[in-house]
Each structure stands twice: as C-alpha cells, then as structure tokens.
C-alpha cells in the first residue's frame, strides 16, 4: 500500500474494467430488447447478467474515483471528481467522465426502481447507457495515459465498434414495445387487426392458433407469462396466454380450451376460427412474469400449462426446476407428450384417470424452498396459496379467486377528477358498469378481476380489492384498483378519470 505507483495501476485497471463492462452491459441490453441470440438466450439469464454487468461497471467506476483521490501524484479532490470542469487536470475530458458516471448511476438506479417508474421514464433513462459509453470513450481517449500503446488502441477499437454495432442493431431491429408493467395502467391503443394463419388441435377440446399482423409488421417483444386480449368478431374479449417462442417476431401462438359452460368466447373460437379469420388483439401484457430464482417448482392444471411451458423453455440448461402437470387424462393435456419427451427427469404428469385421485399438493410442496409458479383452476390455486409463503409464490388464475367482502355491498359515489363527473354506484352494480353507464370510457377485458386491463389510479378513498392480481408493495404504492370487481369501502372515492 506504500508503493507510490499502486493507486496509479488501480486507477488504470478499474477504468478499463468499467469501460469494458459498461459496453458489454449495453450489448446485453440489446439482446434483452431484440432477442437476437434466440438459440442461446432466455429472459431470466439475460436479466441477471445485464444487472450484474451494470453493477460491476458502477463498482469499478467508484473504485476508479477512489483511487484517483488516493493517488498522491494526481491529487484529485472530491469536488474535482464530482463537479464537471472543477479539476485543474484536463478539465474538459475529466468533465466527460463525470457526466458519464452520472448517466451510469441513473441507468442502474432505474433498473433497481423499474417497478416504481413509469415505463417511458425507465426507457428514456436506459437510453442514457449509450451516451455513457460514448462519453467514456472520449474521456479515456483525451485524459488517459495509455492512449499511445497498441494494446490500448486495440481494446478501444473493439469497444467502440461493439457499442456502435449495438446502437445500430437496436435501431434497425425496430422498437419492439416491451411488455407493459403489470402494476401500472398504460394508455391502451386500439386493438390491432391480426389474421389467424393456422388452427391445429393440441388435445381434446384444445386448439392452437397462430396469429400474424394483418399489415405484416414486426410484433412487440414479450416475455414468458405474457397474455393477449383477443377481440372476437362476436363482440367478446378473451384473454389467452402466449405459448410460442418470444423470439418469433412475426407470429403469436395461443391455445384455447373449449370451456364446458362457455359464455361465447371459447365456443366461438372452436366453432368459427379458421385460417384467414381476422380478429383484434391487444397486448401483450404480463402479470405473471418469470423472475430470477435458483430453483423453480412449476404447477400447472389443465390449460394452465400454456404460460408455464414458455417459462420452462426460457430457462438456462443448468437451472434447477421441476414441473407437476395435472389434468383429467393425457388426451386432454396440451403439450403433455412433448414436455415429457424433452425433460423426462423433471416433468411429472399426473393424469387423474391414471392415478385415480387428486394430487396431494401438501406432500408435493412439503419441504420445498423453490420459487413456485402455479397456473390452473381455482381449486388448485386456492390450495397452493395456503401452502406456500407469498414471498415464494406466483399465481395466475383462470377466474378471480372467491373473496368474501369484508362488509355487505353498499352504494358509494365516485368523483372522476379529470372530467369532474360524479357517478353513483349502487349496491347491485360493479364500479365498471356504473362508469360505462355514465359513458366514462374504461378499457376492460375479462371483467372478472383477472387480466388487469381495467386498472385505474386511486386519488382518494379506501378500496376493497377483490381481484385476483397480486397485491404487491409496488401496486400499493401506485394506488391501483380494478373496477370490474373491486369496490369502495368509503362513501366517496376519487379516481384519476
């Protein structure tokens, strides 16, 4: 530590590592947004690596600043390193490095707060990563002491070319609208027309549909767990999980089960959907996203396999996971043979006509510390919620969970802050129905508290949440309710409408 040149070496090494990891992090961001390496990438691994690279770049930058202060030859002060143009040594190039540091700090901070930030803010801040790479390149070229060496020039050339290619690929591959955040209501565009290009049987009473844009444009990026809202020609809207390859940008794939007591949605699909039929499509949206974990336990019941299958296919080869797939019989279970053939050691098929009994979820879940993802009928999801801590459980339901209101249904008044309208909601109405009767537009889909399409912001009042979506701290902080099923506990409720 007494070597006078020690901190000089630390300064050079930390700066180079920060530059390299910052550039690679930008490249990784391109992979996340465009899914170019479709043969090897997967959402969970990419997000983990992207976050780690950003954190490493920020850590190395902090070490670079610290070593500059400790170096007795450079004698930089805190003010010199944090205030642009304050340094005596090459103030212009040093100022570029300081601005790049603040950009990097903003980008990484937005990653940690992505669930609390509006999507457009998060996206704007993330574009700052390209600016940071450019500024660091000029900072290093004008203020570094190794600029003349061939090794430095080679590294600089590789980094600059990589950053340029990343920016070009990101621009030329199309914007790829990301999946909307589950907890934030987004402005909803009109449903885009899509053509059914293929209809194929997947199991008894289950058909698979391929949907392609009517105008042939590239589709938005989506992640496992996402769903579409399909606007059928008979006027109904139904939500279906995506079960294809997220890297496919010219086609969506969904699976539709004919419900025994269909209200007209699944029956229409089975009876009338043929190649060439045009339907409206909204989304993709995601309330069931796959989060990084060391070990997964997937529980699927019936058609609930659709989002689970895509999650499994997105995992790295070394990730620990297993699937429990429950159904009436193998003939009614979509993708059953495919899953068992591809992952015979990790997939357990529990068909009731073979086992003769319902699965013992208590035994299956006993002692597991894995993160649990469950999608299936209410009988399954309700039981799982009693057996797995909420911190390790992610659930998607076909219908809203049965919830007993804490008080009898009472009338209440709603104030729409933006329009100044007052709406009376009777004890026999849903809030959504009352708003629609008053001709106050609210986008809605399932009308059962499952899809989240009708989310509205609460400005004032107390709400009784009766929906099936997870009540996360982020959602609490943003004051969101779903008026198709939820009601007001207070006599007066003010909404951002």
Image (cartoon, helix red, strand yellow):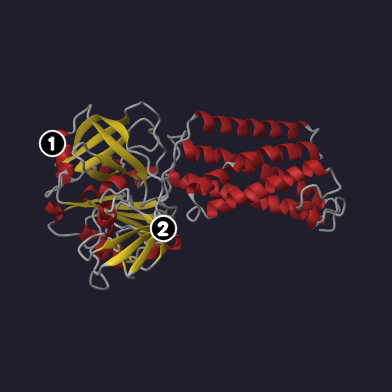
Q: Tell me, yes or no, whether the two marked residues, 1 and 2, touch with CB atoms within 8 Å.
A: no
The kind of secondary structure element at disc 2 is loop
Local crowd at mark 2 within 10 Å, few (<14), some, or many (≥20)? some
- Residue at screen point 66% across, 53% down: 59
The kind of secondary structure element at disc 1 is helix
Q: Earlier in the sequence, mark 1 or mark 2?
A: 1
Local crowd at mark 1 within 10 Å, few (<14), some, or many (≥20)? few
Quadrant that contains the C terminus: bottom left
Q: Is residue 364 visible?
A: no
Q: Residue furthest bottom?
A: 407
Quadrant that contains the N terminus: bottom right
Q: Using residue 127 as the reference point, say whether residue 17 is left or right of it.
A: right
How many numbered marks have been drawn onto this rendered protein structure?
2
CA distance separating discs 1 and 2: 44 Å
Question: Nearer the observer, disc 1 or disc 2?
Answer: 2
Q: Is residue 174 visible?
A: yes
Residue 128, horizontal then vertical, whole percent: 61, 43
Q: Nearer the viewer, residue 61 or 265?
A: 265
Please identify the quarter of the rendering in which residue 196 is found: top left
Residue underneath mark 2? 417
- Residue at screen point 73% across, 51% down: 64
Please identify the quarter of the rendering in which residue 367 is found: bottom left
- Residue at screen point 85% across, 55% down: 3
Q: Nearer the viewer, residue 399 or 15?
A: 399
Disc assigned to residue 271: 1
Q: Using residue 363 as the reference point, say whether residue 115 is left or right of it.
A: right
Residue 436, horizontal then vertical, whole percent: 27, 52
- Residue 348 versus residue 331 in the image, above or below: below
């Amino acid at each position: 530590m007494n070597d006078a040149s020690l901190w000089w070496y630390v300064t050079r090494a930390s700066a180079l590592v920060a530059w390299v990891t910052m550039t690679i992090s930008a490249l990784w961001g391109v992979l996340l947004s465009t899914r170019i390496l479709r043969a090897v990438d997967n959402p969970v691994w990419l997000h983990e690596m992207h976050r780690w690279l950003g954190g490493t770049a920020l850590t190395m930058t902090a070490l670079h600043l610290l070593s500059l202060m400790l170096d007795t030859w450079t004698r930089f002060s805190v003010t010199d390193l944090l205030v642009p143009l304050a340094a005596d040594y090459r103030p212009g190039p040093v100022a570029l490095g300081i601005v790049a540091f603040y950009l990097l700090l903003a980008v990484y901070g937005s990653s940690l707060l992505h669930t609390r930030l509006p999507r457009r803010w998060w996206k704007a801040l993330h574009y700052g990563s390209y600016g940071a790479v450019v500024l660091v390149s000029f900072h290093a070229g004008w203020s570094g002491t190794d600029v003349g060496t061939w090794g430095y020039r080679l590294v600089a050339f590789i980094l600059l070319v990589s950053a340029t290619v990343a920016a070009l690929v990101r621009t030329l591959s199309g914007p790829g609208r990301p999946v909307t955040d589950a907890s934030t209501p987004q402005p909803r565009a009109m449903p885009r027309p899509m053509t059914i290009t293929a209809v194929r049987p997947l199991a008894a009473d289950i058909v698979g549909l391929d949907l392609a844009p009517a105008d042939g444009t590239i589709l938005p990026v989506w992640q496992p767990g996402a769903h579409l809202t399909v606007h059928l020609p008979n006027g109904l809207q139904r939500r279906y999980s995506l079960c294809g390859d997220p890297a496919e940008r010219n086609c969506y794939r969904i699976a539709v089960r004919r419900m025994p007591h269909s209200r007209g949605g699944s029956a229409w699909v089975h009876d009338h959907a043929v190649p060439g039929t045009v339907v409206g499509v909204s989304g993709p949206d995601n309330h069931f996203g796959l989060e990084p974990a060391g070990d997964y336990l997937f529980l699927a019941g019936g058609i609930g396999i659709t989002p689970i299958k895509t999650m499994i296919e997105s995992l790295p080869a070394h990730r620990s996971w297993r699937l429990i797939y429950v159904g009436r019989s193998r003939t009614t279970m979509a993708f059953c043979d495919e899953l068992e053939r591809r992952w015979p050691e990790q997939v357990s098929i529990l068909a009731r006509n073979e086992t003769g009994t319902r699965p013992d979820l208590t035994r299956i879940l006993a002692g597991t510390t894995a993160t649990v993802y469950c999608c299936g009928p209410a009988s399954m999801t309700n039981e799982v919620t009693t057996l797995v801590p909420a911190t390790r459980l992610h659930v998607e339901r076909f219908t809203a969970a049965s919830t007993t209101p804490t008080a009898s249904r009472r009338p209440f008044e709603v104030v729409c802050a933006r329009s100044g309208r007052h709406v009376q909601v009777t004890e026999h109405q849903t809030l959504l129905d009352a708003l629609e009767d008053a001709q106050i537009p609210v986008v809605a889909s399932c009308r059962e508290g499952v899809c989240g399409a009708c989310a509205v912001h609460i400005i004032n009042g107390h709400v009784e949440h009766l929906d099936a979506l997870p009540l996360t701290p982020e959602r609490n902080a943003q004051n969101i309710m779903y008026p198709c099923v939820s009601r007001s506990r207070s006599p007066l409720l003010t909404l951002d409408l």
